[in-house]
Image (tube, coloured by chain):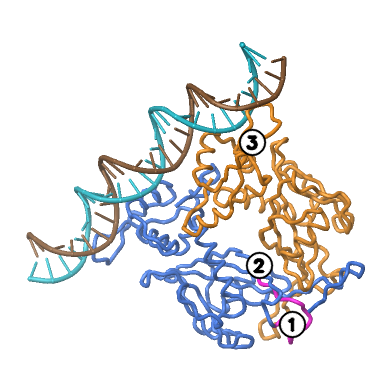
Chain colours: A orange, B blue, C brown, D cyan
Amino acid sequence: MAESKNSSEKENEVFGRFRLTVDCVVFGLDFAANNLKIVLIKRTEEPFKDCWSLPGGFVYGTEKTLDAARRTLEKKTGLVDIFLEQLYTFDDPQRDPRAGKDLNADVDRIVSVAYYALVSPAQHRLHHEGGGNAKDAEWFAVDELPKLGCLSFDHERIIETAITRVRGKLSYVPIGFELLERKFTLKQLQTVYEIVLGRKLESSNFRRRALSMEILEPLGERQESVSHRPALLYRFNEKRYRQLVEKGFDFEL
Amino acid sequence: MAESKNSSEKENEVFGRFRLTVDCVVFGLDFAANNLKIVLIKRTEEPFKDCWSLPGGFVYGTEKTLDAARRTLEKKTGLVDIFLEQLYTFDDPQRDPRAGKDLNADVDRIVSVAYYALVSPAQHRLHHEGGGNAKDAEWFAVDELPKLGCLSFDHERIIETAITRVRGKLSYVPIGFELLERKFTLKQLQTVYEIVLGRKLESSNFRRRALSMEILEPLGERQESVSHRPALLYRFNEKRYRQLVEKGFDFEL
DNA sequence: CCAACTTAATGTAAAAATGACTATAAGGTT
DNA sequence: AACCTTATAGTCATTTTTACATTAAGTTGG
């Protein structure tokens, strides 16, 4: 533990050797239950056997961590082709008990680069035959996560960090659309904001602001098989958004 | 290079072994020159000998990367006790040519966890006798960085990322105060915003917004030895700020 | 000492954005 | 056809923002 050496010794002796892992916090919206959910995996191996954990895994020697995130996410959950963004790097020396043991006998530490993702669960189904050391992938409401102590490693902290990040970004970066299908109604967009931000919004005013940015393209089509007036469908016009950003436009919702 | 193996082999064989470094983007405001500056170090060793680079270095096996950032920053620049926040982790497999060679013969990759810092150059002077593999620390205006190719590794990209982050955060997190001395005038605060955001602001309106948040504590004292009406001095009341945040207050400037 | 100068600080009116609310539209259901 | 539900448009008072004008408080130079 007390490995600190004075500077007269060769510095290289204390440079750490690390293994890197990635962990993914995948958010999805449950319109029915009106809450935000994340994907967790049941661990089948020690440490934290039978505990829930974020999908992820070790990074290969030749791949970028983003690619590792995509690879492990697909392997453990079946999710492919989704919006992924680097969240934070978690490096507490005590965060992973595997360091220095067994397959990791030759490394001092295991550091995790966390990513977060936003998906529409309707368009991205989980597979339930994940191999590797993860048995099953399941959606959990963020305010009903498995009890403390049943989450692996420092994953609870990673999740908290991810929630804070998404809440913070939602209002000034157009990431909310990732939680919806390509075509959506204004009410659905409003619901995204209500659930993530955790408070009710006023429809009429929300509509006005959303439309005033001119990045929502009305599709002419209408909602189908609803037992009330069907809403118009829109899509997020990303090209238009980029053009506006070029001119100094700031998204805000 | 082409180490990818199919999944029938033992996975552990391809799990990478990493060295971690930290790199610090230290921002300071030059009121005289009216621009934003960062600290760069002249490298004295290969690779990138005689090129400029961000202060930083290898992470020890037992320390957190934040501590490594503090340690290397002090060693190379003399800066201590400053605001430091994790920026992003840079992991391009080709980013550091030292991987697999010499002292790093036993690792596949060198990944860097970048931090950024905001300081008041007036209160945090650089020492110019830095040891290690860095000769000299110097302030560079962010829009007059050393020519491309004279910046080490992927440090140009790290700097860009840091600038974008600071610009983005300035308006909704009270980090601008870090660039000022403890006591400051409203005009100085305004200048922080003008320089970082890169546009002029209207004094009267800026004052009103800044004061309306009630996190600036007037100190009674006034500016001294200026050849015009001396401005009142304020300080950022961090305790008050935290109280307000508890109640759901959002900083915005 | 006074006029001129400089920046600080306050005030103000028009314009724009916001919030709460009302009214109407367009479907399905009974 | 009457009614239910949600979509969508519109209204208006209030608040916030913006641009600009005014006054205040110091220094400097004659």
Residue nearest the viewer, comparing A69 with B134: A69
Q: Chain of mark 3?
A: A
Task: State the image coordinates of residue A12 (x, y, percent, origin top left).
Answer: 72, 82
Q: Which residue is mark 3?
A: A222
The answer to whether residue B112 is above or below residue C26 is below
The answer to whether residue B238 is above or below residue B194 is above
Q: Amino acid at mark 2?
A: Thr
Residue lying at 71% horizontally and 46% vertically, measured from the top left = A120
Task: Say if labels 2 and 3 share a chain.
Answer: no
Q: Chain of mark 1?
A: B
Q: Amino acid at mark 1?
A: Asn
User: Which stretch did the figure color magenta?
Assistant: B98-112
| Circle on res. B89 | 2
Task: State the image coordinates of residue B187 (x, y, percent, origin top left).
Answer: 35, 59
Is any atom of residue A92 visible in this view? no
Q: Determine crowd level at label 1: few under 14, some 14-19, many 20+ residues with C-alpha closer than 10 A.
A: some
Residue nearest the viewer, comparing B123 with A35: A35
Relative to B103, B131 lies left or right: left
Residue lying at 58% horizontally and 71% vertically, measured from the top left = B157
Task: State the image coordinates of residue A20 (x, y, percent, origin top left).
Answer: 76, 67
